[in-house]
Image (cartoon, rainbow, N blue to C red):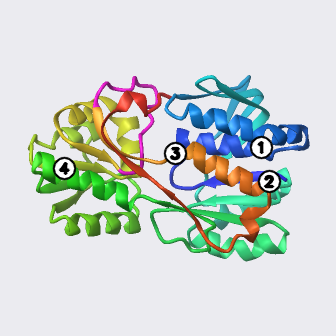
Amino acid sequence: MNLMMMVYRRPARCVHAALIALATMAVGDAGAQSAVKGVPNAMQGFSQNRDQPIQIEAASLEMRDKKKEATFAGNVKVVQGDTTMTSKSLVVFYDQSDGKNGGLFSRIDKYDFDTVLWHQPDRTAKEAVPQLKDRGVQVIGLCDSWFPSIRCQYEVQRESAIMSILRDWRANDAITSVIVARGIETSAAEEELLKTLLEQEGIACEFKSASDQRFADFLNSFTTDKHRGIIFPSTGAALFAFRAPEALAKLMSRSRVALTGGPASFPFAQVPDVTADMVVLDWQLVAEQIVNDLINRKSFSRAETTVFEAKAHLRAPLIQYAHRV
């Protein structure tokens, strides 16, 4: 079996890279089939080292931005703590428009995939699934904090973790208002979830976008107010960690900041020594479950949805969770 994971809206995130790598190496090309027998031991090793940084090495990395494709080739190695997994190659696709422009189908034909693991299936997925089934390609859905367009065998739930953060803010810091910092892309469903949870806790909220401001100026405009918290949804955290890492670190050092999509990666910048409140999902366990289900064919026969609960990590040192890429 060959497995392709389409990562829409959140390209190049390390946590998803880990899931892609584990899944690809477990059920990859014929040359990697022998690795399937060793998956439980390898997964156990990753689970034991889940707090350690993840490093992916390869002889070469080719980025094809026009095709929205990244290929790690030659002795690909994923290292976490004292656990290592290897593969001949690792291909990552991150184009949101694949299903609309036919790129998805051309890639399936090119790489001869027979299974698609679709993260955050949207309307494109709903349109593409019947065509994929006609081609004999099976689709597995993984939804994360919004309403999927197709049935998903796996679901990530973040509500309880977000509520834990908001209750801690209100009880220990008397926070009465929150700014939600938007990225370039926004998710109406994610914003509606945040708004609902904030209303339940009696916390006023305001959604702000950088618009024409420089990203650093936008973050610096958040004047210090000990009774106000800052929330960065997934896309917002990734954007500001990339475009204004120093300003983001400064904001974290003076305010309670929540990263509801999990730790952000800091491309080309040192991960700052600050704390944040994070909604953290154990992606190693997610990978282990999905890979084992694929091997045992349970992903296609199970009627109920498998739910993965994220957890709140309060005042957590960012350096222990985030990655420099």
Q: Residue 238: x percent and y percent?
A: 41, 43
State which region is magenta: 260-274
User: Mark 4 or mark 3, which has the lower sequence index?
Assistant: 4
User: Mark 3 or mark 2, which has the lower sequence index?
Assistant: 3
In front of the other: label 1 or label 2?
2
User: Mark 3 or mark 1, which has the lower sequence index?
Assistant: 1
Label 2 – label 4 distance at C-alpha: 43 Å
Q: Is residue 269 magenta?
A: yes
Label 1 – label 2 distance at C-alpha: 8 Å
Label 1 – label 4 distance at C-alpha: 41 Å
What kind of residue is marked 4? Trp
- Which residue is label 1 attached to? 26
Q: Residue 206: x percent and y percent?
A: 19, 60
- Which residue is label 2 attached to? 295
Question: Which residue of the protein is positioned furthest toward the right in this rendering?
Answer: 30
Q: Nearer the viewer, residue 310 or 31?
A: 310
Residue 309 is left or right of residue 65, and the answer is left
